[in-house]
Image (cartoon, helix red, strand yellow):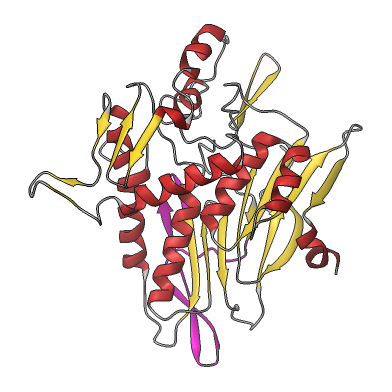
Amino acid sequence: MKASPLYHLLWVFFLAACSGQPQKENAPYLSCNGRTMGTTYTVKYADAAARDFQTAIDSLLEEINLEVSTYIEASTISRLNQADSLFLPGYDPHTGQWTTYANTHFWINYEKAKEVFERSGGSFDPTVMPIVNYWGFGYTEKKPVEKIDSLKIDSLMDFIGLDQVVSTDGKQIKKRYPGVQLDFSALAKGYGVDAVGLLLESKGVSDYLVEIGGELRAKGKNAEGAWWNVGINTPQEDASTTAVQMAFPLQNQSIATSGNYRNFYEVKGQKFSHTINPKTGFPERSTLLSASVFAPDCMSADAYATAFMVMGKDKALPLAEELPGIEAYFIYSDDAGNMRTAYTSGLKDYFEK
């Protein structure tokens, strides 16, 4: 699962605070940016009233982090991970009653994680946290594995699998073993992108672009009256973060990209990537260099991008063709080491114009 920010997508606005941009139909375009989820965010939107949503955005992202961040000890997910067996996220001890509003962000991430787990045949697994920590890509000390302990990995695999977690009516979660832990890092950024987008829409904003750590959601048009133009980075270890493999207009869609070409470490000539295969307990290395997923919502795009990296191109491409609302663009290496691309049929006209 993703454990740190990867800048796979390129955009062209980096401003230190909210500021005005050229107007379109008397509506000024404003930009906000900041830090969240261990990375940065940037938001650009049109608003006739020129309202500054920086405080509202920061408050919302802080609220989300307090439920889904494994880096915050008091967050909902951290308290669950530290519990011996039972956690009651929807229980209000002051009233002695279940609440329907408690931990909404946590439950939305949990339900989406279960959905993608099932549809990917377990290639996406939110219980992979203990293995991610072992390899040094989680919330514990970022320490490369100098010597692989197969017995340790085997013991940690006893805690992996969604059958280790049982939920009831969105009210409680029971873990089969105390060592079971959840990790939403492979979809939480996408969820944050969606949440900010929906916040803007609730304020009447219809033209915007939201980005967190390279994951994007676009609605409407940019200041020039055109679709928001974004790009997919060239998936090479020595490539600049501004090196673009493919640029295109994002038309009322979300996109997320996962890859192994930046977040990895090397020990004695062997590379270990942050994409951990929950079925083997080892970092996944294949000919697939990056997977970019288009979807109506960024959370789905984020989760499936990770699942596809685990699956590899040959298994991911047919699954992407079957999934409703999902399109995928893969960059992979052929037998001769040349960079190639493959994508779902729904993107043919999109990329071949």
**Residue at 32% from the left image edge and 67% from the top image edge:** 56
Q: Is residue 144 one of those drawn in magenta? A: no
- Name the dominant secondary structure of the magenta segment: strand
Q: Is residue 29 one of those drawn in magenta? A: yes
Give the percent coordinates (x, y) of residue 216: 57, 60
**Residue at 69% from the left image edge and 59% from the top image edge:** 231
Q: Nearer the viewer, residue 218 or 231?
A: 218
- The quarter of the picture where the N terminus appears is top right
| In the image: residue 64, left or right of residue 267 | left
Q: Nearer the viewer, residue 225 or 351?
A: 351
Q: Residue 239, can we see it?
A: no
**Residue at 37% from the left image edge and 42% from the top image edge:** 69
| In the image: residue 254, left or right of residue 331 | left
Give the percent coordinates (x, y) of residue 145: 55, 16
| In the image: residue 169, left or right of residue 249 | left
Q: Residue furthest bottom?
A: 26
**Residue at 50% from the left image edge and 36% from the top image edge:** 3
